[in-house]
Image: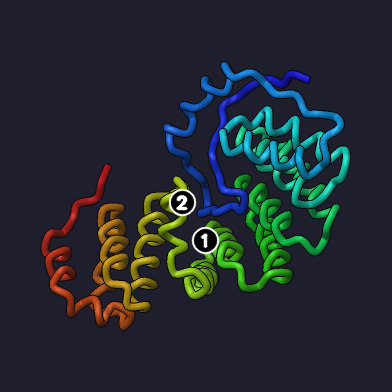
Amino acid sequence: MARLRSPRTLLPLKLFVIFLLAFPLSVLASDGQQANAPSPIPDPNASAKDLEERGDVLRAQKRYLDALDFYAAAIAKHPTALLWNKEGMSYLFLQKYPEATKCFSRAIKAEKNAPEGYNNRGYMEQRNQNFNKAIRYYKKALALQPNDAVFHYNLGSSYWGKHQYDLAAQQYHAAYALDPDIFNRVSRIGVMAQAGSPEDRAAFSFMVARLYAQAGDVDHSLEYLRKAMEEGYKNIKKVYTDSEFATLRTDKRFEELMSQKPLPLP
């Protein structure tokens, strides 16, 4: 059955979020390529596994509408939480948020011990700034899988959205302890901090700079410290007094950065 085609965005299967999301234009530009591609038809005799794998290939090719046909056919044969999550992600790529929400809810119903459904359902609440509901879902995901850096990261993002910065920092620290590369991986997939105000973005960058400094990662600490300055962080002088920056203050690059005094970007 033909579906209306709409703009699509790109996210990983396990969602990263920081308050609000922004997507690279290069991803949005792929829409016309899919529109011109012939649509494959699911084989009614194929197994659920084969249909799922074909849907995965199509989704990797950003052919989300076609992927939905194969996921739906697989679900009709053998509904699982994983399939509901994949179908929900495909709807999310198409910016069909009510449909995505229903799929993530069905994933939870299909397998109450699968943490990804709770995580993804939390994202849908967070994108609507329903932070309390998002927090409840993220906590359920963490109760099932407590050592998942992404779940800690996302929970921290909802606390950040509520301006509960101490609680947010605790979760970001937990995420970093489990995956020291998590902030960089978020940047590489095109998800960027877009807090409710420039002040929130600047505060976030300074918090990450402090976290990296405390861990002894001078390069990334300097990178985020520069971001904080360019975003107009008003309390930048804390870098001279906070104990976490003690080692950073001995680095010549720190002196150079602070002497340059990068101006806030418009």
Q: Would you say residue 162 is visible in this rendering?
A: no
Q: Are marks 2 and 1 in contact (CB under 8 Å)?
A: yes
Q: Which residue is mark 1?
A: 160
The number of numbered discs placed on residues in the rendered structure image is 2
Q: Is residue 4 above or below residue 247?
A: above
**Front-most of residues 223 and 188:** 188
Tag of residue 55: none
- Residue pictured at 33% horizontal, 80% vertical: 244
- The amino acid marked with disc number 1 is Trp
Residue at position x 67%, y 59% in the image: 132
Give the structural element (helix, strand or loop) at label 1.
Answer: helix
Q: Position of residue 165 (x, y in %)?
A: 49, 67
> What residue lies at 83% left-to-right and 40% top-to-bottom?
47
The answer to which quarter of the image holds residue 72 is: top right
Q: Position of residue 100 (x, y in %)?
A: 71, 40
Indicate the secondary structure of the residue bearing disc 2: loop
Query: Residue at label 2?
Result: 195
Tell me which residue sits at (74%, 36%) in the image.
Answer: 99
In this image, 50 relative to 193: left or right? right
Q: Nearer the viewer, residue 8 or 124?
A: 8
Quarter of the picture holding the C terminus: top left
Residue 154's spot in the image, x, y percent?
57, 60
**Is residue 265 left or right of 208 when viewed as pictured?**
left
Q: Nearer the viewer, residue 127 or 53?
A: 53
Left or right, residue 62 beside residue 217 = right
